Image: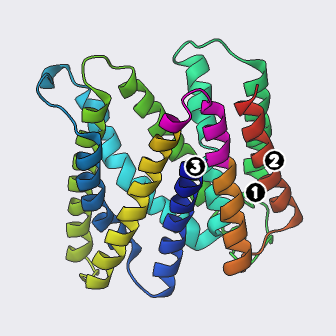
Amino acid sequence: MVYVLLSVVCSVTVSVILKLARRHHVDTRQIIVWNYPVTVLGSWAVLRPDFSDVVITEAPVGIYLSLAVLLPGIFVLLSASIRHTGIVRTEVAQRLSLFISLLAAFWLFREAPDTGKLIGVAVGFVGILCSIGWHRGSNQYGLNHRVWLYPLSVFFGYGLVDILLKIIAQHTGTPYTVSLFVIFCLAMLVAFGYLIVILQGKGRFSMHAVYWGLVLGAFNLGNFLFYMMAHRALPENPSTVFTGMNVGVIALGALVGLVFFQEKLSRINKIGVLLAVVSVFIIAYS
């Protein structure tokens, strides 16, 4: 469980970095861009992708390109959601995005529907609606101006990413490690293209953003690697890893958001966070 704990800490730290960067007036868009070189180099060192038997014409190039655009774009939405609605709501939305891929498994991938998991999804959706604060006048973040669309976009965006990654995992023509590395490389190219657009507009190049981005990339990569190591360390208990990761991020994110950043939640928001945790347990052990 040490790897699960480390993965949880890295995941929440990513949100904290984006939150603090905003407070220090560092452009979070540029930070996200500079996170990708670390991701690419780290994934190359750890995944060790073998291109020897790869046939480009058989690879799902369309899905690669879709993910290359989606990943940086959703990262920007994640940053915006943290800025406008806080860490607590954003972490709940990101973690419960697993419901999208779970429903896709039933209806798109023809897996047999499981009553327990469907109940968990239903509880989770209620948790999402309660926690993101779509109702008016709930707290300090001005959610009456519809900025709740940010966490909702994070929810659906990461759910779509999960679905596309599952399609790639089922693709037998290309090794999954190769696919992940190619996606990270393409995402980095898209991110640098986005940086060029920023600099040609009103944005100014920030060396501070480079430093922040490299740190962000280290924790983002750590989240991914420790989660993989947790599954390898507990191969017979995937539900334990799944539960520990999702509940851990929601709980630690709530603690950090409420205690260190004084984020204010209404009673219904707190009920939503609790329902999110309950739904993860239902899904994991049903």
Disc 1 crowd rating (10 Å Cα; few below 14, some 14-19, many 20+) is many
Residue type pointed to by label 1: Ser
Of marks 1 and 2, the one in the foreground: 2
* Figure check: 129 above or below 23: above
The magenta span reads 231-246
Residue 149 visible from this viewpoint = no
**Dot 2 lies on which element?**
helix
The picture places residue 235, in percent across and down from the top left corner, at 54, 29
For marks 2 and 3 on the same chain, the one whose residue lies earlier in the sequence = 3
Quadrant showing the C terminus: top right
Residue 148 is inside the magenta segment: no
Residue drawn at point x = 20 percent, y = 68 percent? 196
* Figure check: 143 above or below 26: above
- Specify the label residue 131 is tagged with: 1
Q: How many marks?
A: 3
According to the picture, the residue beneath numbered tag 2 turns out to be 275
Report, in whole angstroms, how far the alpha carbon at label 1 lies from the one at label 2.
9 Å
Q: Main secondary structure of the magenta part?
A: helix
Taking 219 as reference, is 241 left or right? right
The picture places residue 83, in percent across and down from the top left corner, at 56, 73
Residue 255 visible from this viewpoint = yes
Q: Are marks 1 and 2 in contact (CB under 8 Å)?
A: yes
Report, in whole angstroms, how far the alpha carbon at label 2 lies from the one at label 3.
22 Å
**Dot 1 lies on which element?**
helix
**Dot 3 lies on which element?**
helix
Dividing the picture into quadrants, the one containing residue 239 is top right
According to the picture, the residue beneath numbered tag 3 turns out to be 4
